[in-house]
Amino acid sequence: MLHIINQVGRKYLIIALVAGFAQFLLLKWLYPFPDFISDSASYISTNREHLAVNLWPTGYSAFLNFIHGINTSDYFLVLCQYVLLLFSLLYFFYSVLYLFQLSGVNKTLLFIFLFFNPALLLLCNFVLSDALFFAVSIILFSQYLWMLHKPTFINLCFQAVLIGLAFTIRYTAIYYPVVSLFAILVSGYTPRVKLAGIVMPWLFILPFIKHTQDATKAITGTPEFSVFGGWQLANNALYMYGHIQVDNNQLPPELRVLDDSARAYFQRAAPTDDDLAAIQGTYFIKNRNAILKPYLQAWANSHQFQAHSSRDNFQAWGAVSPTYKAYGRYLIMHYPVPFARYYLWPNTRNYFLPYLEKYSNYNLGLPEMFTGPAAWFELDNPAVYTRINPAAAAAFFSYYPFCFFILNLYFLICFVDFIVSGKIRYWRDFPVSGIVLAAFFLLVNFGFSVFATPVVMRYQLLPMTLLFFFCLYMTQQLSRKKQDIKPKKQLIPLSSSQVR
């Protein structure tokens, strides 16, 4: 990497490090304490109660535990997250500047976006998996580009390890092997090496899935992989419930009580569009009166169950999760058109204009952090404050969703022009293959985000980063003559003896 830094320019590294240090000091002056939500407490309770599984993947909890073993300070945690993010951005920056020929102006614009971006800076202050997941993911995408440019066996192995690591941090990474499959297929590896590369990520993913299922079964009695997945599926399906007529008699017997609860809720207090918009994408999970949590409470009452710990809470959520998963799947399979209209279409709009969520408040607007995090960081006083008006910060970040929308639209226009101009015919050759890979990644991310997850701004910072770079590059390329995009030489598949 040193020769790449020397070739691209050391000045970027020096400026990024000096500016990064100054920005970290500014961040901690504005936000003396890290930012928390309920998920933060869950990550920490996994460590405090020594749980092998919880509602969220345990990779970030392991990271927290490792950092905590070195220093218990919350400042130290935020610093570590920032350093990891900074160096991942440097790796991406130097990789793309070495692999793609950007003009001087575009280099400067990309540098400013990566290293003077308040959204990325603030991401490191969240006690959430976002900064770590972003860092791993941006390095992973850089590896895809290196695989296309220089298909060595080391690059292939590195991307497999990164996918496995990302999957332990956030289950969103379940679609990363799909992107990896595409990258490997268009790369210059031989068929046998391609097959090995396709299989390798699963050597890390499948054992983690098995471990999670076994640990979940030990607590809940059901070998589920993602307890939260059942809740999410039912939540998504319930967005259309007020617009369909469910025949309760046709439901499997074990789902009828839940359906009775859903029908009664919508007859009594059907949520308005404003109600649904107020709780971004997870209304039926977070609202205490909206079907799922009352059903959970009814289960607890019938089993005389009381939750006194995160383990107990996980057990309760896991007990009803299979029912929720089956119910959500039934509704979606039997009413696909209403589901598309009342969940997928609104979520598509949300994708292009993501909710600000964490960027619109600090610590959920609470004056104190949760008890668990306060104890974890060994704070005598759980009170938190900022030196910036949260409303002013929210007003500033409110421009980000619009920027994300514009970048998506502009990328689409450029990509269509790329196709019409004929430059796409070199899609198997670098750097055109890099553009096609980016388009494929963005398409898969769009599909997964719309169907499976709440769409919030912090989840879309990685796509936004890729969009920004490739919009710069495609604008530059489309301004040239057609023949300029043609590679000087085609990538030739490497033989087994050539693969290192």
Image (spheres, grey):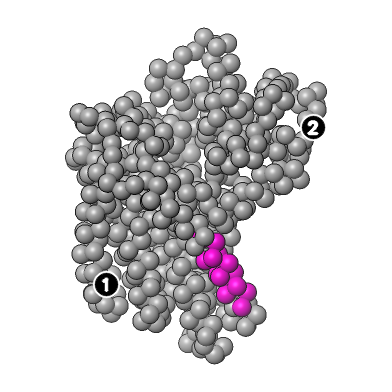
Residue 227 horizontal side relative to residue 43, left or right: right
Residue 442 horizontal/vertical position (percent): 54, 61
Residue mark closest to the camera, 1 vs 2: 2
Q: Label 1: few (<14), some or many (≥20) within 10 Å?
A: some
Q: Is residue 13 visible?
A: yes
Q: Which of 339 and 488 is in front in this view?
A: 339
- Inspect this view and state whether residue 200 appears: no
Residue 405 pos. (x, y %): 55, 61
Question: Which image quarter holds the C terminus?
Answer: bottom left
The kind of secondary structure element at disc 2 is loop
Choose the circle earlier in sequence order: 1 or 2.
Answer: 1
Q: Which mark is residue 229?
A: none
Q: In which quarter of the image is residue 409?
A: bottom right
Q: Quadrant of the N terminus?
A: bottom left
Q: Residue 12 carries which label?
A: 1
Q: Name the residue under label 2.
A: 245
Q: Which residues make up the magenta segment?
A: 404-417
Q: Element at badge 1?
A: helix
Residue positioned 20% across, 64% down in the render: 18
Query: In percent of the image, x 48 and y 81: which residue is there?
Result: 476
> Residue visible at 77% across and 35% down?
244
Q: In this view, does 403 lie above or below 420?
A: above
Determine the residue positioned at 52% across, 66% down. Answer: 407
Against 4, residue 168 (above or below) is: above
User: Chief secondary structure of the magenta span?
Assistant: helix
Q: Position of residue 350 (x, y in %)?
A: 58, 51
